[in-house]
Amino acid sequence: MKQLKGLNQKEWMLMRFWLVVLFILNTLGIVGIPLLLNAWIDDVPIFKTAIILAGIWLLFSHLIAAILFITSLQLDMKRPDIWLHTESSIYKLIGTKLAFATIITSLSLLWIELLLVILQIFYADPEFMTFGQLLEIKVYVFVGIFFSIILNLIIVLFFWVIYHLIRPYVKGFSVIITFFLYIVSSIIWSTNSSLEFIKNFPRFGGITIPVPGFIEKFSMNENYRDLTFLIEPTIYLSDIVIITAFAIILFWGAALWFEKKVRI
């Protein structure tokens, strides 16, 4: 427990600066830009603009988490003799960094959601989105992004380990090769419909997720009725079990691989 507490304190010292930076950028982007646009152009709706900007920011949340994670790893890899030569296991060392990158990014997302709530209070637009619809969609988005960030960081860890494995042999080309391998693997995953691999397993525990009210109203428009996000999605517990097992195995394998081949 003392080891974990020490790792958490050390990681907090590294990450707290970036948390403040994200909060400032979030505030300037979600609140500052809509207010400035409204001051220059009277017809610009503040709340709608903030929602659009928040959506754009959410698209980059995985990239932000990955940058925080890699930055933290690389900072300690400058002195691997200090970072790795401890009594803490490699799983604790890397897991703490992964957890903090996820937490910092999640706090940033929660801050964005709070800013949207404040804007909704002062610049309400019930015809566009009610307060209840805002809270509803915020829960959907946050939960989905939170778990996808964790999986994404584990995948990033795997390729970060590959980078350090090939670095002694290819030097400056290691970044290019690693990025190329990441792109190729992503294309293979998508083009070969790897999710079909999951679907071949017996499925159980189906849970139908209701479509948020804000999105459901699009179904009234004939032009949007066929959009897939208007159909109530079904989540299967069996899929969650398989994906969780995949994430655990990949994390365990990447950390073990790193310890055996890279650790001094």
Image (cartoon, grey):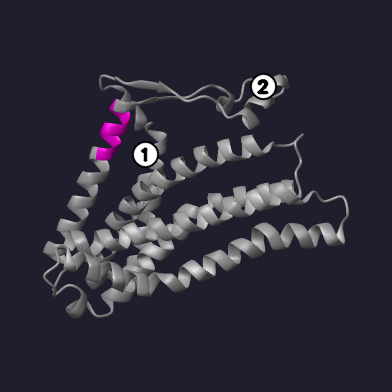
Evaluate whether residue 53 shows in this view. Answer: no
- Residues shaded magenta: 238-244
Report crowding for label 2: few under 14, some 14 to 19, many 20 or more residues within 10 A (C-alpha). some
Q: Is residue 129 above or below residue 22?
A: above
Residue type at mark 1 is Trp
Horizontal relation, residue 148 to residue 252: left or right: right
Q: Few, some or many C-alpha atoms within 10 Å of disc 1 (few <14, some 14-19, many ≥20)?
A: few
Q: Which mark is residue 189?
A: 1
Q: What element carries label 1?
A: helix
5 relative to 130, above or below: below
Number of marks in picture: 2
The residue type indicated by label 2 comes to Ser
Q: Which of 64 and 101 is in front in this view?
A: 101
Q: Quadrant of the N terminus?
A: bottom left
* Precedes in sequence: disc 2 or disc 1: 1
Q: Which residue is drawn at 69% across and 59% down?
A: 31
Judge by depth and name the residue closer to the eye, 134 or 22. Answer: 134
Residue bearing mark 2: 219
Element under disc 2: helix
Q: Which residue is drawn at 35% across and 49% down?
A: 150
In the image, residue 2 sits, relative to residue 233, either above or below, namely below
